[in-house]
Image (tube, rainbow, N blue to C red):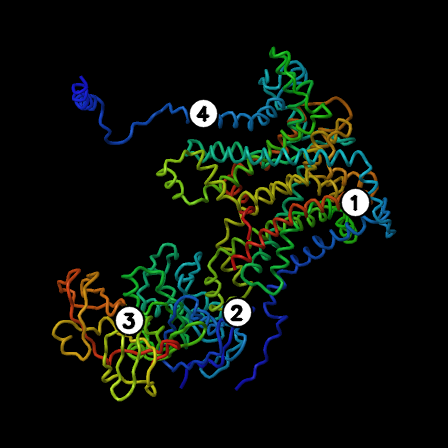
Amino acid sequence: MSVLAYESTPEKATAKKARSVEPSGSRPTRYLDPGRIILYSVLFVAAVYYLLPLYVMVMTSMKGLPEIRMGNIFSPPMEITFQHWVKAWDSACTGLYCEGLKVGFWNSVKITVPSVIMSIAIASVNGYALSHWRFKGSEVFFTILIFGSFIPYQVMLYPLVIITRELGIFGSLSAVVFVHTIFGMPILTLLFRNYFASLPPELLSAARVDGAGFWGIFFKILIPMSVPIFMVAVIMQITGIWNDFLFGTIFAGIKNFPMTVQLNNIVNTTQGVKEYNVNMASTILTGAVPLCIYVLSGKYFVRGIAAGAVKG
Amino acid sequence: MNSIEIKKLGLRFGEVEVLKNLNLDIHDGEFLVLLGSSGCGKSTLLNCIAGLLELSEGQIHIKDRNVTWEEPKDRGIGMVFQSYALYPQMSVRGNLSFGLKNAGVPKAEIEKRISKASEMLQIEQLLDRKPAALSGGQRQRVAIGRALVRDAEVFLFDEPLSNLDAKLRTDLRVEIKRLHQRLGNTMIYVTHDQIEAMTLADRIAVMRGGKIVQLAPPTELYNKPVNKYIAGFIGSPAMNFLKGILHGGDQPYFIVEDSKFPLNGYEFDGPVPEEAEAYLGVRPEHVVIGAEAEASVAHHSVEVEVVEPMGSDTLVWTQLCGQHFRVRVDGQSELKVGDTLEIGFDPSKASLFHAQTEERL
Amino acid sequence: MQAAKRPNPLFKNLQAKIAAIPMIAVTLIVFLGCSIWTVVYSFTKSRALPLEEFVGFYQYERLFKTSRWLISLENIAIYGIFSLILTFVIGFTLAALIDQKIRFENTFRTIILYPFALSFIVTGVVWQWILDPTLGIQHSMQALGWESFQLDLIADRDLVIFALLIAGLWQGTGFAMVLMLAGIRGIDGEIWKASRIDGIPTWKTYLFVVIPMMRGVMVTTLVIIAAGIVKLYDLVVAMTNGGPGIASEVPAKYVYDFMFARANLGQGLAASTIMLTTVLIILIPWIYLEYGNKKQKS
């Protein structure tokens, strides 16, 4: 009995083997791998969470007030209208003034453009000096600068108010540009320093043998080959400065308030009826500039984050 | 006349002494190679000569002019770097002309020099390309061209061939040698590759620990290394060393364990010590086998342990008196592991080094 | 022989020194000078304007007797702890998921990161609206028939800080995700081959092999996020303005209000000095670690 059973086993095995398909060629793809399904479901849920506020913002901005009060925030508008966007741009009220967000928009432009140019001009030269022309003490200053970037702004606010007042620029566009240039310096200097330091030092040696000096090397050799890092810096600074609230409130003065400050004033004004649709339209308009930059420059934006995180 | 004189040069980075009291005279039109393993200070020395590093002590003269504190551009040098260091955003023409433009050389003259250099290096058809569109060998030609157009007195090469693959390296090596023969400039060439050094140099300066250990023509370096380090560094496959006792007198001989090696014909560097611990250095290619071995003064029987055929010749690993010993034999030999081999060598071609100081005896 | 004069070391590298003047000025005057000024004047009686009348620790004593300050501290502590933990967990999980060679990787990454490009003001305003107890999610859910649905964090004194947390995480997790993804991708691919041959499950490889190798990225993320938490201000202003009552006040807002709205400079300066101290407590171990490592390397 047992011998029989023993004998039959190999036979069975070969029979089974013959019937099943021998693995050969490329592995068959499993389209419905349960792990993958879970993976995509989780990511899908996450995407919904991240997209939800944007969706709500857009939907609300296109509804009338009665519809907002009656319906739910997720439902699409019964009839699409952009009149609240127009109102937000042109005639929304902040306190006593009813000139809309356009004032803030242009103020933000007037703040952002010179701040971006100033901060990048100064920081790129700094980064260059720190990467290839180190001098005694340069690393010490750089270390203080980097750790300085972690000091809460609140600590330095009041003295800066005094400084800008002494300089006679407090409450003006120059003051905000000044402050943005200062606080943009640590991260930008780090960014440029690390980038320039990653270039082969032999290149600079070659340029020195060829008779180029400090500025010659910077303008003729380094800048032309560093366009991507300048892009990263520009994007980082535009979004950062556009989104600033604190410095705008304190240093710009009422008539120069940037868009973010104005948005906050429109939304959180205690007077009158709360116009949720106009509020959301204002929010979209304020977020539109950095959002557009983000979408158009995804790669550089991500690189900016990564570059900021790499310590030198 | 000397082209370059380096006097008592010292360089410190903080506490670390990189170069110590270094003296070096380089003749006009000489091809001098600075050879050493990484960290020996050879590139540092070259950078000091170029003016890219500031020395802490001493002087550098180029063509009888004290250039110790001069900027690189004013020293009359051209330099070629290991990583080519071409300006990536400029065309080849732009790369070649950048230095001349900075120096305010007239346009016509720039054109003339570029066409001469590019013809010499056969890069005429590449002039309008960007460096990214060039192969490694082409890039290094352009880098050499950039030094060439400067009409420099002295050419400095900082490991120019290290980034190239083996075949290109040999090709460009010959080309650099041709260039030197044609131009007759002084050239200083840094490398860690002893074959490059041997093939190119009029004289080689072997550096170690920030000092020049031996400055000599290649053959002298090969035949009479001043210490055990150089003996092991120069030559491939490396020299065999047997540790034993040297007995002086009229008929000096060397004892390893129970075996005696007569040293007939060995030229001692100084007075022969009575008895001293020492290393006997024998190059694998100086070992003879078979009948030839039996005819030589010192011959022994050894067993073949490993055979490494390399085509032109074969390297045989054996043990001699309990110490590793390599023998270079003809590539056609059919030795097998376990074979017994009769070996011998000519003591006049060997080297002896003191066991403690490792200096040549 | 020419006896050229050795150049004066002060003028060595002169151009670089000139180029670095703005940086030197900023470090000395702003980062050091202004901070020291603030610390010094926090020991004075300053009210509307800075006064040089020193009163010892008076401002600090008052500060720690003020319930608004104490609530601010409590809030930032709760927000900070939850924010740190959740940002790390969510950020890493998302990064690990996105690392699974998925399709539409770019789309997912873009969606998760876009809030980071927005201003805290925008974030605050949007979430204020979504969480609005009368017209937001709660209202919608109840209108859809889920009568018992409750989500009125923003109006609840005890829970309002979690409303801020939801908004803060929405904005900040994408940033952590990008950093961690860069960290994961920065790890040598052969580690994955080795663990696959050893038959280690993917999640275990992440947990026991990848995370320990990402120490650098983790520390950087930690420091950046922590420093950001201390600065938390805009979001509160836009979303709750400290309310209901003073239930969602935070230290940065306290400083601003006392300095610029209430003309009580001494309090503002003392509060900002406490903020500075907190940051130093976070930073010093990090600096120590960094420098310790550098010394070991050299």
Q: Position of residue A281 (x, y in %)?
A: 64, 27
* Image point (61%, 15%), residue name: C141
Q: Which mark is residue A76?
A: none
Between B132 and A304, the one nearer to me in the picture: A304
Q: Nearer the viewer, mark 3 or mark 4?
A: 3
- Name the kind of residue labelled 3 in the image: Met
**Contact check, label 3 and label 4, Cβ < 8 Å:** no
| Marks 4 and 1 belong to one chain | no
Residue B184 visible, this angle: no
Horizontally, residue B185 falls left or right of residue C261, namely: left
- Name the kind of residue labelled 4 in the image: Ile
Q: CA distance from mark 1 to mark 2?
A: 47 Å
Q: CA distance from mark 3 to mark 2?
A: 32 Å
Tag 4 residue: A38
- Quick one: label 1, few (<14), some, or many (20+) residues within 10 Å? many
Tag 3 residue: B239
* Image point (59%, 26%), residue name: A53
Q: Which mark is residue B16?
A: 2
Q: Position of residue C136 (x, y in %)?
A: 65, 20
